[in-house]
Amino acid sequence: MEDHNQGTNLDVFPSDLGGCRILLCTESLGPVNGVSRTTKMLVDQLRANGVLVSVVAPYNHTRVNTFAPAPSPGEGFWYNSQELRLDGYPLPFNPELSIANPIRLSDLFEQTFDGPPDLIYLASPASVGFQVMVQLRQYVKELQVPIICNFQTDLAGYCSILFPWPLGDIANRIFGVVQGNLFRDDTVKTIFYPSNFVKRYLVNTAGVSERKLAVLTRGVDVEGFNPAKRSEELRNQWRRNDELVLFTCSRIAGEKGFGFLAQVATELDKRGMNFVLVIVGGNKNPAVEQDVKDMFASLTEKGKVIFVGFKLGEELMKHYASADVFLHCSITETFGLVVLEAMASGVPVIARDEGGPSDIVQNNKTGYLVPPDDLNGFVEKVLQLGREPDKRKELGAASRAAACETSWERVGNRVAWEMLHAIEQSEQDKATTPNMGRLTDQPPMTAIAKNDILRRFTEVKLVLVRSVIFVAWLFVFGYLVFAHVHKSVKTYVQRISSLAKTVD
């Protein structure tokens, strides 16, 4: 795409964006995950510079919320601190996320800015973002609002892993068609992508023009994630015999590559490596978390794998800095913020060469990239760093230096300049296009009248969409129940069989 930020000083926030009204819709607001954290950083930066931001997100059914609740209209409502929550269905395998109920875009406009905003920003669009894009494209040109999307979650990739063949492949193709159709619309001005892995998907699978695409990496708090926070006291809590401390941080779920990590840990144990693997993270669905923990059951009994649960703030930063090597086994990450946090902490990274980490880790300089299916190659790199403390130190120092070149402020400024350009371009289009400057000068069939007709059609569509979402939710829930029952029966049969053999 045309680089609107070329020649722009990204160390400076665009002052002309101050006072503009931004409707920011996100699928995740509050839980400890990459989308929620990066969205909060952007919202804080925009508001700090005088931008009027209204945030819309589904309810987080776990009640974990890193955003302070906004006052209601009757309690001192003010636009640049508003948070609007939507009802929805929690995902069975991850109740931190919800599928939002059908919404009416005009209602969102009225409840936030008492009218259309200057721009809509969609953070990792899914159940909320898709609805916004579908409805906005039905508005007449006079009432359309420019959209900027930030593609942060590989929904298609998750489907391929969560569901068995051929359901995963079918869902993957459906997402490609749906996303491509929505992203290609004229209302979508810019799509931020975090890595070349995502760019290839958007261009080759979703069919999005490269002219709409703009790279947007992530920043990291290099003061917070810092090698100086290494704690020998914490390391001694993990170790019994001067073991090498391997570390990973992630939501505990199958799609995060824990099956591969369990194979790595098992192979390291077979080869006699002296290590302890510390796993930070959890899942609000106990059954999903337990399934992952079962993969490491024998190693956990030996004290070689430790699950320490969720960690936040200073405690999380101390955990990162106290590790020797960071292992990243997920292949569904569009970026992989945890990799950047490990690098800022001065910890070398070994990652599977797929997704966002492929663009973050400099192979043989800040860590190692291993082909995604090369289990032996991954194990060999861990063994190598276990034998070579000087190499760990060298890679760790290079990792820290590379991470220090990133900045959340520059990332936020990049987005802000793109927002300003989209708003200015939209205003120019309305000023130069007949009948788009002033609605009051139009003939009897005004834009508003046309929109009222479209709104009636939208109401019918919303009922249909609600039904589709509910059926889809039932399908996912039913599948997971079936998988859980099947696993329980299989385990029970195996135990009976083992008991029978023991009796014989």
Image (cartoon, grey):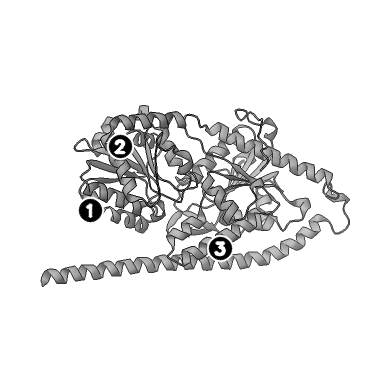
- The quarter of the picture where the N terminus appears is top right
Q: Residue furthest left?
A: 504
Q: How many marks?
A: 3
Q: Which residue is mark 3?
A: 174
Q: Which residue is mark 1?
A: 298
Foreground residue among 474 and 1: 1
Mark 3 burial class by Cα count in 10 Å: few <14, some 14-19, many 20+: few
Residue 308 appears in view: no
Q: CA distance from mark 3 to mark 2?
A: 42 Å
Establish if 126 lies above or below 80: below
Residue 57 in the figure: left or right of residue 64: right
Kind of residue at disc 1: Ser
Residue at screen point 37% across, 29% down:
227
Q: Secondary structure at mark 3?
A: helix
Q: Position of residue 80 (x, y in %)?
A: 62, 39
Residue at screen point 32% across, 66% down:
487
Q: Which residue is mark 2?
A: 385
Q: Nearer the viewer, mark 3 or mark 2?
A: 2
Residue at screen point 34% across, 52% down:
260
Q: Secondary structure at mark 2?
A: helix
Residue 243 in the figure: left or right of residue 405: left
Residue 390 appears in view: yes
